[in-house]
Amino acid sequence: MGTSFELYLYAPNRERASQLFEAAFDEIERVEEALSNYRSTSELSRINANAANAPVVTDPEVFALLERAFVYSRESDGPFDVTVGKLMKAWGFFRGAGHYPSSDELARAREQTGWQRVKLDQRTRSVLFLARGIELDLGGIGKGYALDCVARVLREAGVTAALISSGSSSIYAIGAPPGKAGWPVRVSDPLDRTHTLSTILLKDQSLSTSGNYEKFFQLNGRTYCHIMDPRTGRPVEGMLQTSVIAPEATDSDALSTAIFVMGPEHSARLLDSIAGTSAIFVTDKNGVGRVVRVRWPNQAATSEQMVKTGSR
Amino acid sequence: MNRRSFVKAISAGTLGTAVLARGVEQVFGREKHPVAPSDQVRLGIIGPGSRGQELMRHFLRVPGVKITGLCDIYEPRFAAARKITGEETPIYRDHRRLLEARDLDAIVVATPLSLHAQHVIASLQSGRHVYGEKSLGLTLGDCNKIVAAVRQAGKHFQVGHQYRYAPWIHEVIERVGKGEIGRVSHIYGYWHRNGSWRRPVPDPKFERLINWRLYKEYSGGLMAELGSHQIDFANWFFGAMPESVTGSGGIDSYHDGRETDDNVQVTFRYPGGRSFTFSSLTDNAKAGAATWIYGKDGSVEVTMEDAIFYYEPKRAGSPVSEVMERGVSTGATYSTKGEMPYRGPGSPVKIPEGTGGNPNQLACKSFIESLRNNARPFADERVGWESGVSVCIANQAIAAGHRITFADHVKT
């Protein structure tokens, strides 16, 4: 997954804290070794290398995570898709610079994309690619999953207050700091990252954010972000940022990506499918921004507000 | 190396000599199917702790493997291990009860080192094949007993030296064997980490159970838990066991009641003027983990994921001019450049598509194939014995503070 993780926790002494850090980072390492597509020795790399030839049997944990990812693909009817890597490559998001693909390049990438081209067989716990060139990339769910795994390890070790984050995308809170109601977490304004859009208190919850500011390129006055709409094969436009609060980081991570693609008008059903979720969208249409909140803390059930946006 | 020659390399190690091949026939007689005819292989796990759980995941990635029993004395392990199997796998609190179960073809032993002999031998005597974690045994006596038990039981035994199954390492051994980096006289291995090696304990009464690696009653310390892999590599590469070893070590960073050293440095001497030096630190991770093969014409860096060849710079046609008059050097030149490590990208080892992967996965898969095909595992009891014994004697040398000769302790 190739991201940096941070961990804050309350412990009775420094020695105990350092043991907990080691246990947590060992767990991240374990998950990375299963799910990373940057490592040739990972389980995901083994699946990617072989599943176009024959069904690849995997262990229950990896299989269950793939099933969970595909539930999102089904529930969202496509916008969340762990096979989207080839599209990202076609748009130049693996080598950094960005690139407007030719129609041939785009057509080829689209042939090698699509969750429906992956067959999961629960009986044999196997994965089969129905087309050559398919690649699984769990970047949209794996970091959240790693946070949930670390949270489990820390809880089992008796930790009652900790905050774990993966990159800038997901954060999970175990309990709350002593004497506090939760961990204060700031959701920043995508138009000016020094401004705060909302400050919330997280307690036994996660927050994930997807934004078009993380990786993007500009061409002829248009901004192309790294989040793809698998239905069109193109980067999502008109969306600046989505944040999702959910009881588990696996869900918030996947949901923030899915609703970024779907937009506020079409996300309600997906958000309702996981109890305890709330979301905030910042959209940008022709220089007019909207902030849409769905069950966001301290707000009416759903609220909207207009904000002025502009070019970055 | 293409896929076929990789298979051949494995086979050469498996059945390379007539003696071994005869041994296999004698051991297995007419038993053609050492596992259930359905071809499903049913495994029991003794010790599903962190390492045991890792092995379980790898075994469950092999088609047709089912885990049918879990044995531990630490209650929380059962829930964690059942989460991995995804089912209500039967649990046992005594390994003898597990071994009484009928639906088991092989046993995976991943208990603390001091328990290997007891658990491996009991499993073999129950008629099961065994995948036994490294190091082979805590003492020389344990190592000898395990080898005797494997041979007496006539069952397959594979030791947890998973790097024996890494295709890039086979490729390196083949290429270096053909002379690509000249004569090799030294191997350097290091495994440096920055952490106390101590695991969180929910209740002080579980300290020794969870942090067994830190106590000599159960553990061979860094030499056994980390060094044994690289010792096995040196034994494999040199095709011999060490003749002697010197070493040092100490508890210098973590004064927390532990008994095993938090840093060790050992040098093994091999026949023919060759050596293997190993270092393990726990308070600096800059170097990480790697094994370097140093030859006259080049070097190979072997890691857990890959290997890279480097070549010595071509020397100038004539030696550096140096004029010696009455013992004083008057015209010598000295270039610091020549003493700096030569840098550059090196030449990564390429392995055929589809043969790579995680060595643990490849080792687990190979063990299951050994059972299905009735073939001796490549990392068999002899491999385990050679590295296990080397670990024991290295630890003796560290404790004694002087050189120890292998021939005084074991017949190799």
Image (cartoon, helix red, strand yellow):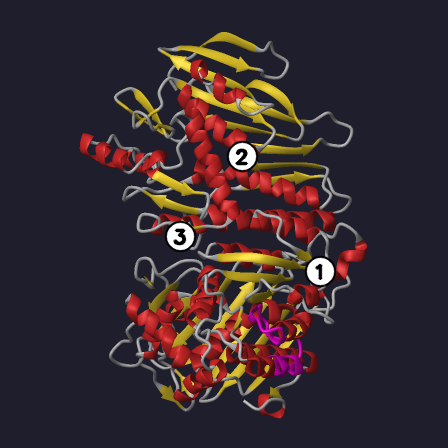
Residue at which label 3 appears: A46
How far apart marks 3 and 1 lie (CA) works out to 33 Å
Q: Quadrant of residue B105?
A: bottom right
Q: Which numbered tag is attached to residue B211?
A: 1
Task: Determine if the magenta segment contains residue B131.
Answer: yes
Is B35 on the left-hand or right-hand side of B256? left
Asked if one can make out residue B341 in the rendered structure from this viewpoint, the answer is: no
Mark 2 residue type = Thr
Please state if B229 lies on the left or on the right of A233 as rendered: right
Quarter holding residue A98: top left
Chain of residue at mark 1:
B
Frontmost residue, B319 versus A159: A159
Name the secondary structure under disc 2: helix
Q: Which mark is residue A250?
A: 2
Nearest the viewer among B241 and B14 is: B14
B344 shown above or below A143: below
Task: Check residue B232 in the rendering and tell me which mark sits there, or answer none.
Answer: none
- The amino acid pointed to by label 3 is Arg
* Magenta-highlighted residues: B124-146
B100 inside magenta stretch: no
Helix, strand or loop at mark 1: loop
